[in-house]
């Protein structure tokens, strides 16, 4: 995984997904269970089934969205 131009590697005790702020480069972990709940909500609303996997979702962190 690359973050702010540096490669990061590690072994996780639990499954998780990454969220990355496109503006500041802040990287955070999201439990796969939390992502699965979000995916289930999207499936209920759109009919599209999403399979969460160990990838990176990009967006803006709270600080960037409100500041």
Image (tube, rainbow, N blue to C red):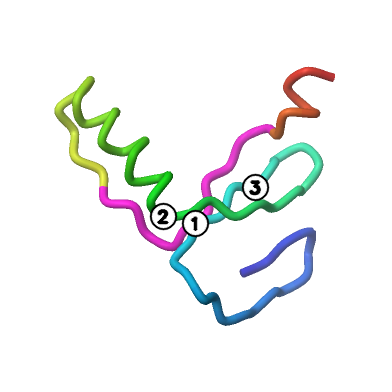
- Range drawn in magenta: 51-60
- As helix, strand or loop, the secondary structure at mark 2 comes to helix
Q: CA distance from mark 2 to mark 3?
A: 15 Å
Determine which of the numbered discs, if any, sits on residue 20 in the image: 3
43, above or below 34, in the image: above
Q: Residues within 10 Å of mark 3 (few under 14, many from 20)?
A: some
- As helix, strand or loop, the secondary structure at mark 3 comes to strand
Q: Position of residue 4 (x, y in %)?
A: 79, 59
Q: CA distance from mark 3 to mark 1?
A: 10 Å
Q: Position of residue 13 (x, y in %)?
A: 51, 76
The quadrant the N terminus occupies is bottom right
Residue, disc 2: 32
Magenta stretch: helix, strand or loop mostly = loop
Residue drawn at (42%, 45%) of the image: 34
Taking depth in this image into account, of 58 and 67 the one nearest to the observer is: 67
Q: Are marks 3 and 1 in contact (CB under 8 Å)?
A: no
Determine which of the numbered discs, if any, sits on residue 17 in the image: 1
55, above or below 9, in the image: above
Q: Earlier in the sequence, mark 2 or mark 3?
A: 3
């Amino acid at each position: 995984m690359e973050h702010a131009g540096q490669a990061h590697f590690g072994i996780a005790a639990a499954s998780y997904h990454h969220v990355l702020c496109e503006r500041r480069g802040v990287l955070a972990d999201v439990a796969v269970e939390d992502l699965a709940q979000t995916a289930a909500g999207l499936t209920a609303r759109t009919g599209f089934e999403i399979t969460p996997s160990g990838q990176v979702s990009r967006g803006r962190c709270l600080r960037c969205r409100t500041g």
